[in-house]
Image (spheres, rainbow, N blue to C red):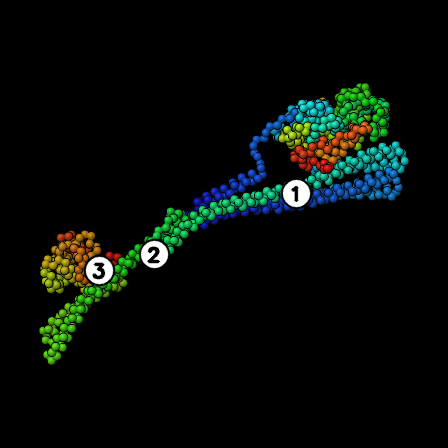
Amino acid sequence: MARLREKIFVPTAVLAAVVGLTLAVLGAATALDSRALAREVNEVRRANALALAATQAADAEQRWVLSYRFRPDAALAARIAEADARTARLLRDAGALALRPRAAALWEQYGRARTLLVSSRDELLGAIRANAAHDVSLAFERWHLAAERVNALLASFQTYHARLLERTVADLQRRRELALLIAAAAALVGTLVGVAAAVLLARRVAAPIVAMSSAAGRIAEEGLAVPVGGEERNDELGVLARSFNLMTERLTSANARLAEAVRMRDEFISIASHELKTPITALKLQTQSLLRLAARDPSRGIPPERLVEATGRFERSVSRVAALVENMLDVSRLTTGQLALRVQEVAVRDLVREAADRMTEELAQAGCTVRVECDSPAVAAVDRSRLDQVLMNLISNAARYAPRNPVVVRCRADEGELAIEVEDRGPGIPPEHHERIFGRFERAAADGSAQAGLGLGLYISREIARAHGGELSVRSDPGAGATFVLRLPLRPAPARAARQAIERGPSGT
Amino acid sequence: MGRLARTSGLKLAAVSLGLLLAILLALTGRRYAARPEHRLIVAAVRQPATSLFFVAREGGCFDREGLAIEERDFEVGRDALVELLQGSADVAMAYETPILRSYARDDRLRVLTTLHTSTRNTRVVARRDRGIAAVGDLGGKRIALARGTNAEFVADHILTLGGVPRAAVTIVDLPGERAAAAVTTGEVDAAVLWDPYAERAREALGGGALELATDLYAEFSMVATRADTIAARRPALLALLRGLACADRLLRDHPAEADAAIRGRFPDQSDRDLRAALGRVTRGIGLDEMLGTVLRREAEWMFRQPGVEPPDLSRLVDPTLLDEVEPEAVNLVARR
């Protein structure tokens, strides 16, 4: 995955390095130029000082010689000698200078011309002292030519260095202007590329972040699930986009589940309230009836037959409330994983027959007959009361949903598995409801009408079956009755099975 | 590093560097197009003193500048200048004396650079058997020289410095080779010659030869052109000067190789004679105050007749082209 940091910082670093390197090179070149100029200036200064001193010495000497021609005295001779000595020192000192080749050539020519000048000067002075007019004239001409040459060479030497300094300064000025232009160009290029990079970064980095921020804001304010683009990127922003969308999806899903749970809770409360209200209202009415009866003739009290009848109704209402509360408690236990099974060895045949016997009255009231086809000698390790609860629930459902129809209860056991079927000849259950009926609070009949009760019976029965390591299912088609099949291992591992039941979660979730 | 990041970085670096390079090239104004071809007709004087030009030719200096040379040889610069001023040549070589004479007649003449300087190249070769032992003995003698050349000035200069009146000698106008032959045969008593003729005459006379020269005379050979040629053919003339500057560097850095390259130009001289001749001259391009002094002095001598004003020399030397090619070689004091 290409890291975002590399995408941002590598180009930026490269750009900064290029611009920085350019400016650093320019700076170094400028610094070197300045040093070179300083060296040049120093060289020129020293050479010019040398030339100036030589020129001054030559001028002085020539003046003294001219004067000597017309006034040959010892003082002038001494001055001539002094100027000569000064020039000789200059020629020696010049050897320490590092002159450029052309300057060195000019100085060498000057040295040779100087030698010629000295000899012609000495010849002239001699002719003057000898007072030989003709010789003086010739000697003077020769000395004058030599002096002219010396002066020309010194002038050339000075001009050379003056022009050298001019060119050096002009060259430095040009290089500095060029350096400034290059620096400006580098800055311009850097700015242009920087702006382009900033635009690119804004589009490729900032824009996705802004989009995610906007999406997060909408989710926070409006609760809408807003997916963001950029999942296809192979950098941190791509990871962020994918994570954001996954998080949004999970939040949406969790919200939906929460909403469904709240709806189911509200529905359960509504149903529970309604279901509980009925027997409690009946209890209340019955209590009020007894009180009125007792209040009518306190001396006689309540007739025993009325008391027995009322007590019976009390008992039935209380039983009903107790059953409802017990179911709700069972659901709570199942949800929190606290359903504990008390496993014991139970003869299957006896279990089935006893459950059918207990439901005889309710079946009779529904106009149903019950037939038990269970002769298996098998013994199962089950929680007797819970299995009884399941069978009674299945038989009760059969009576409720298939009144005036026979109910058959079968059992068989083979290969370590117990199968108990409760079959009715009722309207049947459409295939699309086969799973839904095992959900909590599901009470619809085949025709879609609601039935009384909390709709927890099948849910609890299936969870009990799963807690035993088994399963509860249905075979049914509309109009062909329904057969509920309870499968259990004859020897379950209740603890593991209970855990598995809890891990699967409640049916319908 | 991710491939995408590396690619982005490389692209950005390439774009930045490319932009910078383009700007740099534009700013420095470099052109990398092929050099244009130039052609010049050079009226040349083939002497050891002017051999800087031949070093440039044989060393390939003109070829590198894209300059094609058509060389027309003359014995003396006087005749080369005639060719130049007639328009038959673009450039001519000559010493300072014919340059001044030609300039006095035609002020279109312009000096571009010197080729050499010397105090010992042009000299008097005299016959000892004519009683000549010093300059003072030249009085009454016949001296052969090429009129209109620096030989004429040298003769006057040496005679003046030697205290011999000009009228005391008889000048015989003969070009260099014939003057050398004349002194050798005894037709004349002395001749004012330059190498190779001076050396040829000295060798022919052997011990009977006396060479008279003065360090108080400095000669210069120069490359000259016309003002209209400078205006119309400036790039070609600049190429010529760059070629000569190249030869100057060759002589400085590889003198033996440079002189070996021009050996074939002087087939009638022995190696020893050629070496001796080259040793008497200082070859190189330049325009300095020494040249100005020499030109002024010779102009004064040339136009010393009463009432005759020397020509205005301020426009004779044009330093602008050499300044463009080799600024360090131009050391003339500016005169307003």
Identify residue type, mark 3. Answer: Phe
Residue B217 figure quarter: top right
Q: Label 2: how many residues lie within 10 Å, few (<14), some (14-19) or many (20+)?
A: few
Whether labels 3 and 2 belong to a single chain: the reply is: yes
Chain name for mark 1? A
Single out the residue that lies furthest toward the front.
B307
Q: Which mark is residue A222?
A: 2
Amino acid at circle 2: Glu
Image position, residue A72 (x, y; %): 88, 40
Sequence-earlier tag: 1 or 2: 1
Please state the chain letter of the residue tagged with numbered disc 2 in the rendered image: A
Q: Earlier in the sequence, mark 3 or mark 1?
A: 1
Residue A6 appears in the picture as rendered: no
Question: Rounded to the nearest whole Å, what is the CA distance between mark 3 and mark 2?
Answer: 31 Å
Tag 3 and tag 2, C-beta contact below 8 Å = no
Please identify the residue farthest to the bottom as the structure is shown. Answer: A299
Circle 1 crowding by C-alpha within 10 Å: few under 14, some 14–19, many from 20: some
Amino acid type at circle 1 is Val
Residue at horizontal 76 percent and vertical 34 percent from the top: B293
Q: Quadrant of the C terminus of chain B?
A: top right
